[in-house]
Amino acid sequence: MSNFIFQDEIEDEINDKPHKTDKVWRILVIDDDESVHQVTKLVLADAEIEHRKLEIVSAFSSKQAKEIMLNDNSFCMAFVDVVMETDHAGLELVEWIRKDLKNQAIRLILRTGQAGSAPEAKVIKEFDINDYKEKTDFTANKMITTVYASIRAYRDIMTIQRSLDAFKKLIATTHDLLKINQLKNFGSAALAHLLTLMNVESSALYIARTQVDFAKQTTSSIIACTGKYVCESDSLEASNIDKQVKARIQQVFIDKSHYRDDSCFVGYYQASSNSASVLYIEFEDDNEHFKASLAELFATNVALVLESLTKQQEIEKTQRELLFIVGEAVEARSKETGAHVRRVAIICDILAKKFGLEDSFVEAIRLAAPLHDLGKIAIPEHILHKPGKLEGEDWEIMKSHAQIGADILEKSTVSISKLAARLANYHHENWDGSGYPKGLKGEEIPVEARIMAVADVFDALGSKRCYKEPWPAEKIKEFLLSQRGIKFEAKLVNIMVEDFDEFLQVRLDYPDYADPEH
């Protein structure tokens, strides 16, 4: 489920198979003698290396060569004359290419008609060139041999460079692997790395996964994709990729074996007894250098990593859902049939982000938010369901839910549970110190509890309760402003009021559930 390894050494034989590519190898000839350019073009006119023609570009001085190379780094090699404007112009150009231009990939072949001015042993030792040829001894066959060797060396250097670049990208991606929303990013980076290593070009790549759960239900998803059919949907069936591509992927899942033709490779990888992955590669040009065995080695390992990440994703998703279920179960005891806990979690998330908290803290607050009223499970139903304002002993019992919730959650050693305990315990504290259970004031109240206080009241006022009807938006806004610096931290109220419509939209996006009794 990633990208691949090295191509084989090019064969010298002519391959009669047609190729789609029209790419060329670009060679720069730097010499002040017009005849040298003519002879070079004549000798190399019909040469074809790795199914690519050669394009010869001429420069008649080192100055002109510099101008060309400053704007064009696509040359694979250059023939450089030693004596041009000066007796050592070619040598100075070589030094400029390597040190100033910092081009280490281009293969530099020094040619001289005056060997005495630049002795071979001295030049090879002191200058970063790749070959040294005397013009009088440089036959057509030797020129072709030199070009083949230089282009192959350049090809291998560029393959290694692309591999290193892709590897750096992969390393940069891995620090986010444990974040669920980075799963597809990892897969896509792995795909790009695979093709770079294989030196195979592709127009479309996919990693698809299928899993059979304990109830024998099968789900198929797109884990990673890149290319012309990049899809937004995680579902294989719902994705907008080509129907034929989709059918091939689905058939490989059924056959449980690899498929390959001239246009694509589809690999099957069994990750566990109940899950498998498929790697789809559509070739853009030719597939001559693609090696399925190398693909299988690399893809199998990446499939195992992605399988582990996918399981983590499922576990975290289950945990989040369970937190919501527990929170909603508590609400249901109070005969609240709405989506209060989900809305409050989202509102806390928005508030925390706008308040400037770190992303990890924001995510923790969102996860813990559904448990803010957990202590209500210990409150008698006749108090929870009592219409009107609670007073006296009933009110004291109701207030105890804050401490009860905290006591339950503090038994856990998990950091999210510890944060949830603070939310439960302090979300009824007031900025001016008039709240409960501790009478904390101002910044003595944990920031997560201050955020929850605003979010909880905002959503509760807009919801129907056994003791009240929902308030209109303007009345809610007026109440929040009236309690700025009293019940709530002023900065949080300002944030909510400034973007009031955004918070109201949460209610529209997550409306109260219908009462099951109606």
Image: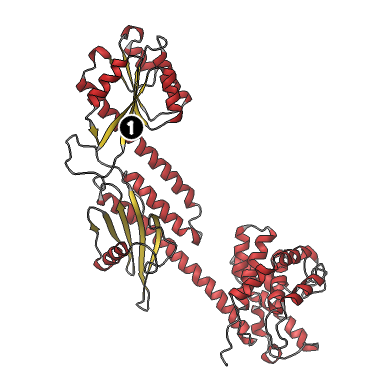
Q: Is residue 137 above or below residue 246?
A: above
Left or right: 43 as drawn, with respect to 499:
left
- Say which quadrant the N terminus sits in: bottom left
- Where residue 251 sits, quadrant-wise, is bottom left
Left or right: 411 as drawn, with respect to 176:
right
Q: Nearer the viewer, residue 385 or 233?
A: 233
Q: Residue at 20% across / 36% down in the picture? A: 11
Under mark 1, the amino acid is Tyr
SS at mark 1 in the image: helix
Classify 10 Å Cα crowding around label 1: few (below 14), some (14-19), many (20 and above). some
Q: Is residue 98 visible?
A: no
- Where residue 129 sits, quadrant-wise, is top left
Q: Residue at 66% across / 80% down in the picture? A: 375
- On the image, the x and y values in percent for residue 18 come to 20, 44
Colouring used for the render = secondary structure
Residue projecting furthest to the top: 116
Q: Residue at 58% across / 66% down in the picture? A: 414
- On the image, the x and y values in percent for residue 44 come to 24, 26
- Say which quadrant the C terminus sits in: bottom right
Q: Is residue 359 visible?
A: yes
Left or right: 366 as drawn, with respect to 395:
left
Quickly name the residue at label 1. Answer: 154
Q: Residue at 23% across / 23% down in the picture? A: 42
Q: Is residue 64 above or below residue 253?
A: above
- Where residue 424 sits, quadrant-wise, is bottom right
Q: How many marks?
A: 1
- On the image, the x and y values in percent for residue 115 come to 31, 9
Left or right: 370 as drawn, with respect to 438:
left
Q: Nearer the viewer, residue 333 or 415?
A: 333
- On the image, the x and y values in percent for residue 193 come to 38, 48
